[in-house]
Amino acid sequence: MPGRYKDKLEKLLPEVDGWLSPGEIDKINFLVNTIMSTRQKQSIFSSDHLSYLPDKNEHSEKKILSSYYSAYIKIADGCDNHCSYCIIPFIRGPYRSRTIESVKEEVKNLVKHGVKEINLIAQDITSFGKDLSGGKYQLPELIKSLLKIKKLEWIRLLYVYPEHIMPELIDLMKHEKRICKYLDIPIQHIDDKILKTMKRQSSEKSIRKIIENIKENIPDIALRTSVIVGFPGETENQFGKLKKWIKKTEFDYLGVFTYSREEGTPAYSLPGQISKKIKEKRQAELLKIQSEIAHKKNTNRIGYTFRTLVEGFQDEELKGRTEFHAPEIDGDIIIEKGKASEGKFVNVKIIDALEYNLIGEIVK
Ligand code: SF4
C-alpha cells in the first residue's frame, strides 16, 4: 500500500508515525529508532522502491519466525510475467533472483537450528536464476545445491509457472526423495481465449501436456492449483469448460478466487465485467466439485502408511503433515494413537478420511 498510495495514505492516516515503501523494508530498525529518538514522524520512500532483495549477509543469522522445523525461503522477488489482472509486477518490479550461494547459506543456517523442511517461494520459483544467467532457469541447480545440506529432509516447491517447468526439474523430483512429491501450479483458467486475455503464456494444450507429463513421471505426486472465476467476459460456456477440466483432472488441492478488479492493471478496463453474485456462484460450484474430489482422494489413502512430520496438537490430539501437505493450507493428519514430539518424523498409517483431513495412527 505505501508503494502505491504513499501520498494518499499519509493524509488519510495522520496518526501513523512511520512509513516505509516495500523496497526499504531492511531499514525498518533505523526508522523505528529514529522515530523513538526524535519523537517525530518519519518516512522512507525510495525512488527505486523495487530494489530490496535479501542478501547473504542479512540472512546468515536470520531469526526463525515460523515453527523451528519448517521455514519459507524467498528465493526471488518481482515478476516479469505481467498477467493482465495482476498488480504484483507494478508493486514488486522485475524478477530478481538471489544467488544460489545466498539461498544455500540461509538454508544451512536454518538447518543448523533444527529446520527440517524448507518451502521455496517467489512469485514464480521456476524463473529462478534467469536474470543472473542470461535467461537460463536455474531452479534445478539451486535444488541440487540445497540437497548437499545433509540434514535437510524436505524441500517443497511452491508457486511454479506451468510453462517454466523444465524436464530437468521433473527428473530431479522423480529421483530425489528429499524433494516433496508436491507442486503448486497455478493455472488460472483452461479456456484459450481467457488465458490469452489474461496474458498467460499457457494454452489449454500446453497445460494438459504439462500436467500429463508430471503425472506420468511422478504418479503419486500431489498437485495444487488455483483458478480465477468471473474474469471479464467469462461466458457460461467458458466457465463450463473450466468446471469440466477441474472435474476430470482431479487436483489434490484447489484454490478458487473470484476475479478482483485491480486499479492500474490492463484487465481493469476490460469490457464484460461480471457481477459479484455470478462470480461467487461460480466459485461455490467449483469448491463443491473439489470437496468431493478431495474426499475421494483422502479416502484412497486409507490403509497406507506415510512418513509424517509431527506438528503439535489439534485440541487434545497430535497432528502432522506428509510430503503431500504444504504447511497451513492442505489439511493435516490427526494422529489418534501413538506418541511423538513436535518436529519429529514418524510413520503414520491412515485409518480414516475426512473432507480435508486424514485420521491416522503411529506405526513402527
Ligand atoms: S499472477 Fe503471478 S505470474 Fe502473473 S503477473 Fe502476477 S505474480 Fe506474476
Image (tube, grey):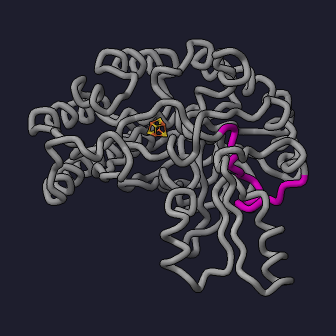
What residue span does the magenta drawing correspond to?
61-76
Residue 30 vs residue 180, the one in the foreground? 30
Magenta stretch encompasses residue 142: no
The residue drawn where x is 30% and y is 52% is 261
For residue 188, above or below residue 275? above
The residue drawn where x is 86% and y is 50% is 58
On the question of residue 342 being in view, the answer is: no
For residue 252, above or below residue 216? below
In this rendering, the count of numbered labels is: 0
Q: Position of residue 197 (x, y in %)?
A: 27, 30
Q: Position of residue 67 (x, y in %)?
A: 72, 60
Residue 11 vs residue 303, the one in the foreground? 11
On the question of residue 325 being in view, the answer is: yes
Q: Position of residue 182 (x, y in %)?
A: 54, 34
Q: Position of residue 44 (x, y in %)?
A: 71, 64
Q: Is residue 26 left or right of residue 171?
A: right
Q: Main secondary structure of the magenta part?
A: loop
Q: Is residue 202 left or right of residue 4?
A: left
Q: Is residue 263 left or right of residue 153?
A: left
The residue drawn where x is 36% and y is 16% is 206
Magenta stretch encompasses residue 69: yes
Residue 33 sits in which quadrant? Answer: bottom right
For residue 61, above or below residue 293? below
Residue 60 vs residue 319, the one in the foreground? 60
Residue placed farthest to the top in the image? Answer: 167
Residue placed farthest to the left in the image? Answer: 236
For residue 40, above or below residue 141? below
The residue drawn where x is 53% and y is 67% is 7
